[in-house]
Amino acid sequence: MSRRYDCTNTEQRAAGIADAASAIRAGELVVIPTDTVYGIGADAFTPSAVTALLEAKGRGRDMPVPVLVGTVRAAAALVDDLGSYGQDLIDTFWPGPLTLICRASRSLNWDLGDTKGTVAIRMPLHAVALELLKETGPMAVSSANRSGAPPATTAADAEEQLGESVAVYLDGGACSDSVPSTIIDLTTAVPRVLRKGAIPVEKLRGVIGYVATDAGPDTDISGTTGATEALAAAAEPEKPAAIEPEKPADAIEPEKPADATEKSAETAEPEKPAEAAEPEKPADEVGPEQPIGADEPEKPTEAAESEKPADAAEPQKPVGADEPGPADKPGPAGGSAGKAEGGA
């Protein structure tokens, strides 16, 4: 049986938050007040609880559930990157009615539905919601109503639509504003408003400059669950845009001049004269390098060997000099005459 707590009463509020936190950890559903409308929540990291939430609303996995966080740090842990504008938007509008769609961290073990790798995150400006979130951590939260029905602005409205599918109802009184949060997609180069809500587009532009607003006012406003579906729809027109650049890809026909390159390649046949490196045959003239191996210079070495006997012949001259002997010393004139005759 569902349990309901009046959070305007201090004692019931404390008891209700404690009971709701236990229910979340047990994989059950709770209804909580937020700064926009009442929401139905479950543990974001318990797939069976998220599935029960979708069933309670009568939604399919094609309408994934957004996530509420109690701190900015918790939000940063859920996404890969806040992009160029995420931090400025958080600093200006959080906690508050602004839902940011970012690329979800790949390391997270959760199943929020067919998210296509994205996550819609928000930090609500409501004391009861923030107090519970600090106890449970990130919660998957959607508007507390059946699909197609008006969003609940009181706990009684939510209970009338959801009944016993919810374990705990935290009654924080009537919502001061029934306008849902504004949803902005930060996964594209230019931020894009997917649902107009409590924060006017003009205020967004005042913080980050240009903002696309191709999502019309008829975008699902029954809860932030419509965010990813709108994102998928908005992404579809981008596909034909990608097809257009493929046309210049057909301009591959100009590669016909590439055939010209083949012709030039044929003209490269004159490179055969480059093969006319045959004139390198004069390189064959390097054959004269054989003179480098010049055995001929070795001949002069042989001649040198013959010279050595010539040098040996010179010592023979003194042998001839022995022939005159010391006795011939008195006839040096005759010796010089003999040389003159030999010179004639």
Image (cartoon, helix red, strand yellow):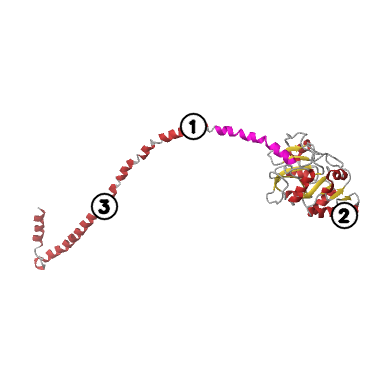
Left or right for 171, reference 73: right
State the residue position of label 2: 15
Three-letter amino acid code of the residue under disc 1: Lys
Q: Which mark is residue 133?
A: none
- Rendering coords of residue 113 (x, y %): 72, 45
Look at 19% across and 58% down and name the residue there.
306
Give whichever of 329, 317 is nearer the camera.
317
State the image coordinates of residue 275 (x, y, percent, origin top left).
36, 40
Q: Is residue 247 magenta?
A: yes
Can you identify the residue that label 1 sits on?
256
- Which of labels 3 and 2 is toward the front? 2
Residue extending farthest bottom: 326
Secondary structure under the numbered disc 1 in the rendered image: helix
Task: Give the residue type that dot 2 points to.
Answer: Ala
- Asked if marks 1 and 2 touch (Cβ < 8 Å), the reply is no
Q: Residues within 10 Å of mark 1 (few under 14, many from 20)?
A: few
Relative horizontal placement of residue 318, taking residue 207 as reference (left or right):
left
Q: Secondary structure at mark 2?
A: helix
Which of label 3 and label 1 is nearer to you? 1
Instruction: Pick whichever, 301 or 17, lies toward us.
Output: 17
